[in-house]
Amino acid sequence: AGNNSNQQQPQPPPPSYAHGGFLMALGLRGYLCALTTTDLTDYLTSGLITTTCGIFIGMAANMRGSCDQAVSKMLCLHIPSLLPQSFIPMDLASTVQAAAVASIGLLYEGSSHRLMTEFLLNEIGRQPTKDQSSNDREGFSLVAGLSLGLVNLGKGAKTIHGLEDLCIEERLLRYMTGEGTETRHRKDMFEGALSSGGDLEKNSKIKEVGGLNTDITSPGAIIAVGLMYIGSHNESVASTLQLPDTHFLLDYIRPDLLLLRVVSRSLILWNDVCPTSDWIDSQIPTVVRRGMNSMIRSAKKSLDAVVDEGGDDNDPADFDFQAVRQANAFIVSGACFALGLRYAGTANRDAAAAIIKRALWLMELRDNKDAVSLIQQPDRSTLLTCLCTTAISLAMVMAGTGDLDSFRLFRSLRWQCDENTIYGTHASFGMAIGLLFLGGGKCTLGNSPRDVAMLIAAFYPHMPVNSSDNQYHLQALRHLYVLAVKERILEAIDVDSHEKVCVPIELTLPNSMTVQASTPFLIANNCEFSELRLKTDRYYDVTIDTSDWKDGRIGTLFVKRKAGHMSYLQDPNGLRSLSIQAASTEQETFHKTIKMFSHDASLVTFSKYFCSSVLLEDPSSDRFCSDEIAAAALVKEKADLIALLLRSFRLADHKGGKSINSGAVWDAKLLGTYWSFKRHLGTDMSNWDVDLIPEDYLSIINVCIEESVCFGISLDSDTVMDDWWRANPSLGLYFLWNDVPLRPPSD
């Protein structure tokens, strides 16, 4: 898919949902830019909504943060608010408009583009005009807020030059709470009308009087504030997201918005998020905690389980039970979602334990029917939403690890399947299991600001009723988690077999602590180590300084196995190592050993034909192929010496009158000199762990050479003459073997 010819077909297939998803996948993987303008036009004119959305999001993801003008023009043509007043009004589906707005956020990510910032700020609170624009209003407003946060991602920590007059924070606060002056509100309505291309056609379905509809504008505004000020620790902005502390204020905020407030506040106070159950409890306002405790005591008192000791001054009848239950469930799940974002891909055990504890609590509320559980149980829809959010939060933390405890929990959660289980519940648990085994255990999730923004867009905590439900969240954005996936697998490759192997390793952390692991090893986010080394006696030592591994790139570890050892996959306990096996004098056993411990084709062929019991008749050959010579060289990791040892071994064949040449005599003399030199040095040669040939076998060679050079030699006066080298050439070998100095022959 890297070139245009692979993506362009002679006869394009008929429009289908699958093809739209395929195009979007190409864009998320970075291959869609190969399409030409003509190709894009053909796809956009096909008329299928999924194909259009796939092209928009795919191209924007492909050109993420580039502000490409060609892609920008394509997107603006499908957003009525950005078209000139002279343009003929276009009848565009609300899903297509939402996809185009989301793509604007991806394309202009981090640019603080003024035109797009002002446009997206107006789109959050856009009033419905045509009847068609009233469909999926909540989802459109959310996408506008998400895109606004992407365009100004992390820019809230400092003043954005040129955007001061837009009063972004003030207007977002008004979208969240509805607070603000009537004059300013009328100005916003006027700007929204201008941004709609002057189309003031009234909506016959919806009429909003007396201010903004915060139920529609709040989700997008809350997400936008969190992304703009992510990691800034701005206490002033974080205070605007404070949860209500009285029952009166609690009744004025929709319960699911409490979840978003907890998440957005955690994004701002990024470093204050702690992976503990106490931190989750600290997010629950005192009024909610007291209300829950009061209801639990009331339930226990009804069962005579405990005696009421006073404690709370509030009468349970003085507040709305259901409002407190919903608020408590949403706040807890929001805190878990914040933990999932903060520790995404880190495999933090403390964070996982805190989330698992809350997931088990929610599962008990779902399954148990005792009085204490029933008194805490919110409505079915709220409970399932919170349960799905908690499951995805745990999956984000343990992404790619394949953690068994998390997997068992997910299986327990999805086990219950009845008519009340909606499509979104199945999708959420399926996504959680998929994240747990992300990339087959080779990938994990990033937790940088850019990655967090994609995770929020993909795992927004509102589950659809069916696959075509885009009312509260554009379902195409569920796939944006791909942009946050990081390949963090450390693998070891054997340089001889070119196969991936399992080897023990040791990682040294900056604080001098060490971590024992084995390859393949998934290196979690925020796991910085300064040194990596092999911890095994089966492979040669390797030590790597990992300070050069920048931008999260993980290198590949190349290893070489020592001779006489097998891989951990073949021999996990090291019981089949050649160095500890009993000696065997069978040549066929030696051949099997060579095949088992060596990948050298020439060595395997040699053992097959030379060390075969069918071809060997000489008992001395059996000794060469046994543990004394060839096998000993393998044990001592000197397989390269086998050719030299074989040449020395062949010297023993020169006996009983067999022909011999001067090269064999010189080889035998060289071996003798080697052993004489070794005996002369004594202990200084102790580090020579390999002998070219055993000393006792050298004696046999010397005897054979002696017999061969002396065979048929008669040293009488008639034999030694001036032309002795012509009359008896073997006499010269005799003189050479016995170090007899000779006068060079004269012509």
Image (spheres, rainbow, N blue to C red):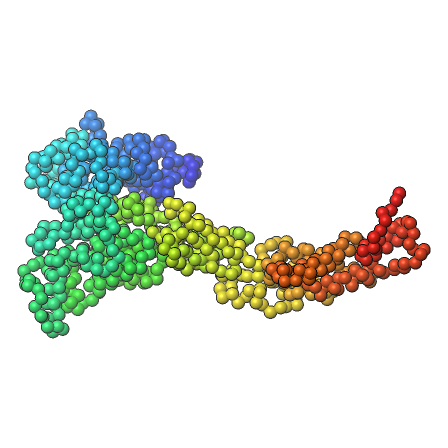
Direction from residue 234 to residue 659 in the image, left or right: right
Q: Is residue 398 left or right of residue 611?
A: left
- Asked which quadrant contains residue 116, the reply is top left
Q: Residue extending furthest top?
A: 86
Is 191 situated left or right of 662 in this image? left
For the residue pair 467 and 398, the one nearer the viewer reads as: 398
- Quadrant containing the C terminus is top right
Residue 742 picture location, percent across and down: 84, 51
659 or 545: which is nearer to us? 545
Taking the view exactly as shown, the residue that stands out farthest to the right is: 718
- Residue 359 visible, this angle: no
Q: Residue at x 83, y 55 (%)?
A: 740
The image position of residue 332, as x and y in percent, is 20, 57
* Residue occupying image coordinates x 65% and y 56%: 641
Which picture quadrant has residue 6?
A: top left
Q: Nearer the viewer, residue 622 or 10?
A: 622
Q: Residue 389, image x and y in percent?
A: 24, 54
Q: Quick check: 105 above or below 640?
A: above
Task: State the image coordinates of residue 531 (x, y, percent, origin top left).
Answer: 42, 53
